[in-house]
Amino acid sequence: MSLRYALLALLRVGPLSGYELQKQFSMSVGHVWHAPDSQIYPELRKMEAENLIEGEEQPRGQRATRRLYHVTDTGNQAFLDWMQTPLEYARVRDPAHLRAAYLEAASPEAARAFFRRHMDQWESELAQWEGELQRIDQVDNPMLVRRLAVTDPADRERTIAFKRFTYEGLVDRAHVEIAWARRGLELVDTLESGGGARPEPSAARA
Amino acid sequence: MSLRYALLALLRVGPLSGYELQKQFSMSVGHVWHAPDSQIYPELRKMEAENLIEGEEQPRGQRATRRLYHVTDTGNQAFLDWMQTPLEYARVRDPAHLRAAYLEAASPEAARAFFRRHMDQWESELAQWEGELQRIDQVDNPMLVRRLAVTDPADRERTIAFKRFTYEGLVDRAHVEIAWARRGLELVDTLESGGGARPEPSAARA
DNA sequence: TTGATCATGTAATCCGTTACATGATTCT
DNA sequence: AGAATCATGTAACGGATTACATGATCAA
């Protein structure tokens, strides 16, 4: 259900084809909400059927065409309504912590591999998000630039502030996951060396 | 796919009926992986069909019966294999941060409501997880007690250590989300009071 | 006898993933 | 001529959610 609002958010800054949308998607909102093209095209058709967007068939070269979508008033209102509505939270479903809870059933090497992978995973997310932060600060993200161009000057500061704040939150989260995995590696070492002593509690919770 | 391993993890400490499993589930592994009973019962049947578990029909009262499930050798091995296998990470899909990124399209009041709800949500998760931590320390969780009873004394320390460590990670994460939402409330205030000044960056990233 | 709890499901639908599938256009 | 990229999907499957559905047993 979030996918359509992510798409509306992008289309609200100006008309795009499915293909452009998909590209923009992976470079902007895709950092918080992943969607493959095989999901985007059908969703656009559904949104058109529900009158949230309108597609305009455009000629391209001799025989090819492409559909340029723009947001309808209904679609714009649907987005605004959604923004005013309390967000529904999904129930916890966390494979990494599920596995961590039963790591005594894995070999120490597998446990280490698990934590190393967890670190790598979040390091790579972190790099993406920190990159976005920089692009926000340098007003260097094409989507953001287009958005600011169609934004009332009085609202530009807020627009930038909330984007920045979003990525700050993601960066903070990544740091916590990385720190946790690092302590996990230490824990495996401690347990393997047979000592009864456990590593000291993390500073984060001290 | 994680559901069946969560179920195997519980059944590995001893046979349970679907109903008992469902209860235990919500009180233990359900803290990291939610599943409703309407998903648990069919999954158990599927697992039985795949020979991971075996159900034994037991009489109960005059006419009623219940199925007691226990893990087969195949099932046990499947669990152990899974524990050795690299975990697959799902792509980001984060409704809260998706919405946060477009909060300039909401009223300040809606933005505040969003952040307050985010705090409440994570405070309540936090309370659950901190409760679990205490129950681990006091060896006061029935499932954990049963598990330790069937665990080689040499492995008991590791069993407890990994459980504790898992919940520590969740607690850390909850703290970060709560701190982020708190800063979000401040940000809304700052933006509303029209000042160009932004709240100072969080200590977490300083 | 009434309510809590024990006990077990089915059906419809939605969202997302993976794999498959095709062809035009433009640049080098 | 060939590669990159523009452009748009379908099909099959799996996992999760929600709503619906039923009935027995046991303790107060």
Image (cartoon, coloured by chain):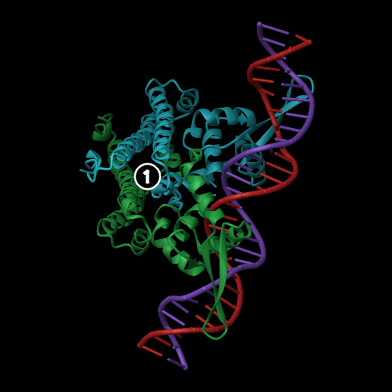
Chain colours: A green, B cyan, C red, D purple
Task: Determine the residue located farthest toward the left in the rendered image.
Answer: B206
Q: Give the vertical position of B141 relative to B40 (above or below).
A: above
Which of B57 and C27 lies nearest the eye of the viewer?
Answer: C27
Point 46% across, 36% down: residue:
B32
Q: Where is residue B113 in the image (x, y as percent from the top left)?
A: 42, 35
Going by the numbered disc 1, the residue's amino acid type is Ala
Which of B37 and B183 lies nearest the eye of the viewer?
Answer: B183
Point 35% across, 43% down: residue:
A108
Mark 1 is surrounded, within 10 Å at the Cα level, by few (under 14), some (14 to 19) or many (20 or more) other residues, namely many
Q: Position of residue D11 (x, y in %)?
A: 67, 65
Q: Position of residue A6 (x, y in %)?
A: 47, 54
Which of B120 and B67 lies nearest the eye of the viewer?
Answer: B120
Q: Give the vertical position of A44 relative to A121 (above or below).
A: below
Quarter occupied by the C terminus of chain A = top left
Point 27% across, 40% down: residue:
A186
Chain letter of mark 1 equals A
The part of the image, by quadrant, that contains residue B154 is: top left
The part of the image, by quadrant, that contains residue C5 is: top right
**Which residue carries the number 1 mark?**
A111
Local secondary structure at mark 1: helix
Q: Where is residue B106 in the image (x, y as percent from the top left)?
A: 43, 44
B187 to the left or right of A97: left
Asked whether the viewer can see residue B39, the reply is yes
Point 45% across, 26% down: residue:
B148
